[in-house]
Amino acid sequence: MHAAPSFTSSSYQKGIQALFWALAAALLALAAVRPIVDPADKTHCESLLNHGGSWIDTQRTQWQPKGCMLKNYEPTSATSCLGKSRVVMIGDSVVRQLFYSVVKKFIPDFATDRDKHANIIHTDPTSGTTFEFYWDPVLNTTTAQELLSGQYQNAPVAQTPTIFLVGSGMWFLRYREWSGGLEEWKKTMANVVKVMNDPDSASPGKHLFISSIQSVNPDKLSDVRYETLRLKDIEEMNIYLKSITRNTVVTVPFVWNKMTETAMDATRDGLHFAERVMSAEADVMLNFVCNNQLPKVAPMAATCCYEYPANSGVQSLMLALLMIWLPIGFIVQTRYNEHPLAAFFPGIGVLRAMAVMAGSILYMYYSDRTTLFAKIGKAYSTPTFMFLCFLSLVAGLATLKRAEKDQPFLSRDQTDEWKGWMQIAILIYHYMGASSVSVIYNPVRVFVASYLFMTGFGHFVFYYKKADFGFRRVAMILTRLNLLTVLLAYTMDTTYISYYFAPLVSFFYLVIYGMMYLGHTHNHKPVFMIGKIVATAILSASMIYTPIVLDTTFAVLKFFFGITWSAAEWRFRLKLDVWIVFVGSLFSYGFIMAQELSITAHPHWAKARTVAIISSVIGLLGFFLFESTMEKREYNLHHPYISWIPILSFVVLRNSTADLRNTTSTFYAYIGRCSLETFICQFHMWLAADTKGLLMVSPWLEGAGSWSFNLILSTILFIVISNQLSGATGELTDWLITGREPKVKGLPAPPPALPLVNTTPRQRPVSAQGTPVPVKRQSVMLSPIAISAGAVGPPGPDALNKLMDASLRLETATSNELSESGSSGDIDLSNSLDKSPTQGESKQSARQQESVSLLIESNNNGSSTNNHDTSRERDHSRDSDAVPVTFKSLWAQPTWKVGIFFGIIWLLNFWST
């Protein structure tokens, strides 16, 4: 087997970063040029009405304008725009078809079998909207003239129409001798435009439209129509319409011609097109009129003729921190790091991680909350979906790599690979809009359940074996899961639970933590442990299935914090995967028991293994046969109770042989290591409108291949940014919780997060060799969360003694390492979340990886016998030298920190609402 490419090598990372910066600079430059080249189309109104587009499905139901997302209006959204208003149309049979399509946006079952040459007036009792159609194919009746001049007295309601449309042309061509032909049509339309555009007369409506002369299909026209409805005449009429309506208040949607020209198979008589085509034409008009009146809240899935809302106060604050405070920090720390102002900024390593985070969030903000980049709708295509899945499979197989040593069951590489290929499948599913396809939707639900299975499995193993229930690990995990989500929620002005994956994993992690902590001294008893898992599962399910629990919780959050979350949506997410986390816990407990009993040495192990493999194959095949027969709504009812079958079957088969267990795909593992970021960032960076559409980073490209090129380009940016963001989030999490700063290449190692201590020459500690031990004065901002956790912060009365102990330990460790290696270098004191104690690692070896700040913390807890004795000797000095109660001392207490944190959340939410 050939060696797979390394996605973590230094040369690979440098090449990817160079490619990323080149692409980012080019895209930003091109995106910035667009408003200069076409300043009149910042809201994509011109693109909607005149710049063409294409059908993105074979049934001709989804029209895609150039560069914006077209909203499909239905009764609720149409009523919110045109409720209690008038819609007036005058014209021929083509206009009548359009009229019916508009009415059906409000009344889907509106009858269309009416007198063809009669007026139609109908008031919808639900919306209060009045619809009026006046039959006048040559615009010569008194009614038409009075409506045009705003003098019509017989209107059903005395109200200016919101939409006023006239259309004529086909009868002038069909009955040339009677109507006066093309020349008479020109005179008529010129007069219509003149009256509509007259500022001194009453306007016939708020939005004035003239229908373009739509194309016909000559092959399907009758002989009489074929002789009179000539394409060259239709083209001449549209050119004339364009000339007389330029720089007027009249709107002519010439895109309707393009819509019919590219749907010639959707007409029976060559003149009148299918209802689905006319419905799309009605949507174009309603998007022009209504989109900017829609509530400007996420998801903003109608971007044609749409102005994004001004930033809220919270958004402005977030953007100011990212665009002003951060650059100032770089300047201060790189050029004026001795200045007192440096104390208000973290070190350069933290600033770099913040810069990656800030740059990524700003890219998402400008991509999905401004008109900088275009957005388009989704369209499912089975061949395209299968092709993308095939490409990802080829990439995975091409990067297979066998481990040098035998790997344990569900090793880190294997779970990263598992998360990676599932994440790719979920991304393709979202990009293609495949949620309506049940045979794809159902397995994707299993993929989400698999992540939660791993959550239950991994955290159960840790807490069962390590029994470490300290605050630090809880804070690390929750911060790592939610840091990006919380920042995006405030920057993008959306809700926390709309990024449902991070809240879902966080919720079930806390459930597992509480389950393992309660009665943890008895966790070694099998009956107690199994009973506790079952009881916790039943209690959790009862709380989720009982509406009053979540409804009350969310009502309290809204009352005190102004948080408006949907209890129904959150209940739906929890109910889908309510049991799988506990299945993962039970499975991990069984795995631990099997290890302790050395079950693989049992004489019947080979037979049991064979039975497990055969059962897993049957389980997988049976599941896929079962789910393929169900629609998504029906499957959702069964999913919580059957999702464990394909998951356990996969786990067994994936580890059934040594070759399978020890071989993993480096490409899938690479994606898996940043799967959290890819899942969250796809909302605004790869997709658009909070996953409702697709982001177009190459809107200047049109025609065949433009969609594919955009997919390649946006995917490269998306994956690289997600990978960089994953590393930055880990570094920021480590700094926030422990106070440690990441090491920056080319710069000295950052100092450990020690308390701020002023020393005099007489107080300076010395080492065992008699040399002074340097004590680093804190010159950068400490992490406030680390202070509250006790890792760093203001010194107590015995801080100097603790500092001496810590410094001597650091010097001893350094001296020992240098003497063993015979060379000089820095000790890596970083400890990310991923470096937490692994399965086979003792608590002592895990503690040895901690930094100096944690050594101080262990002294505080009295974990060392010698230090415990020393601390007892200092009790009297603590009492006599008590520090007075000040704001600084209160600030160092975790209780106050929690209160201040919730106070900030309260202010942010009420400010934003």
Image (spheres, helix red, strand yellow):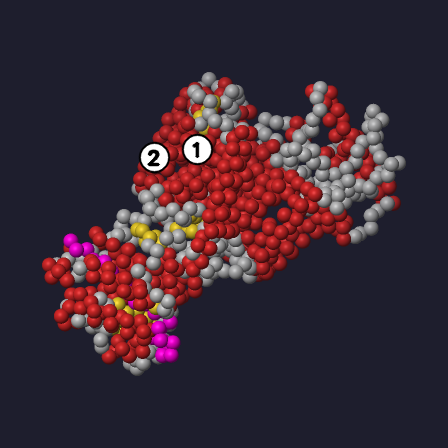
Q: Quadrant of residue 803?
A: top right
Residue 504: horizontal and vertical position, in percent?
51, 45
Amino acid on which disc 2 is placed = Gly
On the question of residue 229 being in view, the answer is yes
Q: Secondary structure at mark 1?
A: helix
Q: Main secondary structure of the magenta part?
A: loop
Is 200 colored magenta in this rendering? Answer: yes
* Numbered label attached to residue 622: 2
For label 1, the residue is 648
Residue 469: horizontal and vertical position, in percent?
63, 38
345 relative position to 253: left or right = right
Q: Nearer the viewer, residue 153 or 478?
A: 153
Residue at 17% across, 55% down: 218
Residue 322: horizontal and vertical position, in percent?
60, 50
Q: Which residues are magenta?
A: 197-219
Amino acid on which disc 1 is placed = Leu
Residue at 48% across, 54% down: 370
**First in sequence: mark 1 or mark 2?**
2
